[in-house]
Amino acid sequence: MFPEWFEGPLGVSIVGRAIEDGILEVELIDLRPHGLGRHKQLDDAPFGGGPGMVMRIEPLAEVLEPLAETHRVLFTPSGDPMTQSTLDRWSSLPEITFVCGRYEGIDQRVIDHFIDEETSLGDYVLAGGEVAAAAAIEGIARLLPGVVGNPDSTEFESFRDGLLEEPVYTRPAEFRGWKVPEILLSGDHARIEAWRAEQRRRRTEERRPDLLDGLQSET
Ligand code: ADE
């Protein structure tokens, strides 16, 4: 409903460059022209009463039915949480359709017949799916071959091995008396790698023990 919303997110940084370089293509579809009647209406009052408006099925059917060959994702707080593995999976698809819901909801028949997957950005309520779609597009773009300069840099980061990242430092080695951990200046690569692995493990234990549970149940 707000294609202009994406001008910023699609225009700058990694996503902007991926589009410019022809690695990523994004087509924005404005729902409004598919609305009903003279006012191009997209929503209506809920059957059974209650507050808020519900997006009608006809405009979305018109847009989503011809896109049945694509993977059609609806962003909604009721969906499965979006994680790095969601983005890994999506990044290998040739084409994906993101549906940004607005208003208080979407007629359930749209979801039953024209949506392949429901996804949530997190356990909070936004005004619509645009922020989630922009997050997904950026997360996918940086996984595409040729987008990030260093091909290693997306492989060893948080969530790839199921752990959070270790802390990193650069020059100066001391600032206001705050020192970089001695080991990182030692030149002993085996010990440095062991220290980094230990930091990842400890950080994850402290901040996100739920991620460790996930790792254990996978093995
Ligand atoms: N739309 C509104 N809230 C949302 C959320 N948390 N995730 C995805 N889409 C949304």
Image: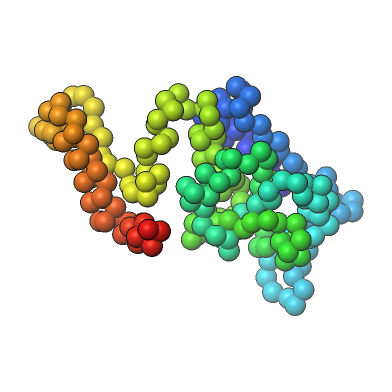
**Image spot of residue 218 (x, y percent):** 40, 59
Query: What's the colour scheme?
Result: rainbow
Could you tell me residue 161's position as x and y percent?
37, 46
Horizontal placement of 11 versus 43: left or right? left
In this view of the protein, which residue sits in the foreground, 71 or 78? 71
Q: Position of residue 53 (x, y in %)?
A: 72, 64
Q: Is residue 70 left or right of residue 8?
A: right
* Above or below for 55 versus 87: below
Extreme-front residue of the structure: 219
Residue occupying the point 76% across, 61% down: 113
Q: Image check: 138 left or right of 207?
A: right
Q: Residue at x 50, y 34 (%)?
A: 142
Residue at 26% over, 56% down: 205
In the displayed orientation, state which residue is furthest to the bottom: 48
Toward the viewer: 159 or 218?
Answer: 218
- 112 displayed left or right of 6: right
- On screen, 127 above or below 150? below
User: Which one is nearer the viewer's eye here, 38 or 7?
Assistant: 7
Q: In what quadrant of the picture does the C terminus appear? A: bottom left
Whether residue 47 is visible, yes or no, is: yes
Task: Note whether residue 179 is visible.
Answer: no
| Pick the front one: 207 or 130 | 207
Can you tell which quarter of the image residue 170 is in?
top left
Q: Residue furthest right?
A: 38
* Above or below: residue 217 compared with residue 121: below
